[in-house]
Image (cartoon, grey):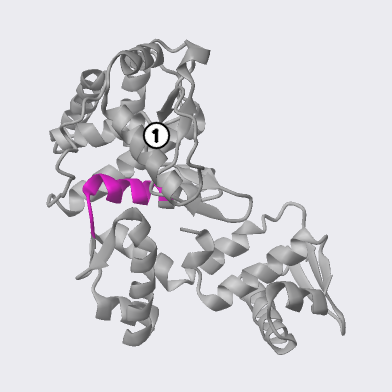
Amino acid sequence: MLKRELLEKPYDLMNDILVYLYNNGGQCTKENLCRNLVITPNTLSEYTALLQNFIVENDFLADITIIEDTQTLFLQKKPTFPLKLCYLKFLERSIKYQIIKWLFTNGSINGPVFQDYFNISSATYYRRVTELNALLEEFQLSLRRGKIIGNENQIRYFYYCYFWFLRENKEDLDQEINKLYIPLIDELTEALNITFDHLEELQIKLWMKITFTRLNQTREYTFAADFERKDRPLFDELNQILFHYMKNYDRPYTLYEGLMFYDFFCSLRNFSVYSPFAYRLAQQQREEKTYLDYQNQQILNYLNQIGYLQNNFSRNGTVFCHIICISTTRNSIILTVSFLILTLGAYF
């Protein structure tokens, strides 16, 4: 899924104009813009006007300005103003983004209520739902009867990737996340002898926010038949920490919660090569055919299938893989899988 696929067409094109001007030193001829964006001069003129209105409506005039003459467009921007702030505003106005946000917040979506709230027609709403389902196919999820349908671990990974990689400013994210997750991080740090940096702490907090939100919304979870049958190295150590934390906060705990937390936690880039926990995890992974081996192969097969890897990819070392994201400067591809490659022989 590309970030831009969530945008409404007008906002997508306005974003293209902004980014193209910025990447070309703040100015470009209208002819070059039309040729590179594959649009007509009339379309460029129309969307330039929309973009100027957008800047005024969002009180960005002191930070960013579009100047137009007969042949050229100019972009003037304060060095301290992040251009991606415009993209986030475009995103907030896009219906597919709001549908996902509504689903996460409320657990389900009532079409007529949503349509009234955002002042859109029924036809527009169902067209956006169809487009969104096409994007969700990549995650083996779908929106049906007002709910997101799929395996629970996949739903949580999707929300995690969605909110983590769409938010450019992680400090804003930090302010939104409840501080009650700090005791879990403290216990993980002490019990496993692992040091987390600020971003890693935020990742754990975001995962727990998603977990608590889903626990408040539904207990009707679906999992793959073999989800709980895979061997997970050192699972008991992590599970005991999560169990203790959930009980202290009077949150419902099941084995599935432990399994999902384990898979998420072991996908983080948080293990120093000198970490005792990482060493023991790698040693057991090396000596046994475990659940991580199974996940590794699933991800390699997927990446090969979509053409990201060639057929002759190396199988040396171990691929620690769960759900993360591959990103570029402008667009982020949110995949159902991504990977952190650790060649164990080089580290241990």
Q: Residue at x 33, y 21 (%)?
A: 188
x%, y% of residue 43? 68, 86
Question: Local crowd at mark 1 within 10 Å, few (<14), some, or many (≥20)?
Answer: many
In the displayed structure image, the side of residue 270 where residue 123 appears, left or right: left
User: Does residue 132 sit above or below 81 in this rendering?
Assistant: below
Q: Can residue 196 be seen here?
A: yes
Magenta stretch?
149-161
Give residue 310's position: percent from left, percent from top: 51, 42
Q: Quadrant of residue 18?
A: bottom right
Q: How many marks?
A: 1
Q: Main secondary structure of the magenta part?
A: helix
Classify residue 253 by image quadrant: top left
Q: Which residue does the image show at 67% across and 55% down from the upper left?
A: 82
Furthest-front residue in this view? 312
Vertical order, 260 against 210 (above or below) = above
Q: Is residue 300 magenta?
A: no
* Amino acid carrying mark 1 in the image: Cys
On the rendered structure, is 41 left or right of 252?
A: right
Q: Nearer the viewer, residue 326 or 291?
A: 291
Residue shown at the point (74%, 78%) measured from the top left: 34
Where is 273 relative to 106, above or below?
above
Q: Is residue 175 visible?
A: no
Q: Nearer the viewer, residue 336 or 308?
A: 308
Q: Nearer the viewer, residue 331 or 160?
A: 331
The verdict on residue 156 being magenta is yes
Task: Give coordinates of residue 329: x percent, y percent.
Answer: 63, 50
Question: Percent from the top left, x then y, of residue 205?
Answer: 37, 37
Q: Helix or strand or loop: what does disc 1 sit on? A: loop
Residue sitting at the far bottom: 42
Q: Can you identify the residue that label 1 sits on?
A: 321
Drawn side of residue 144 relative to residue 16, left or right? left
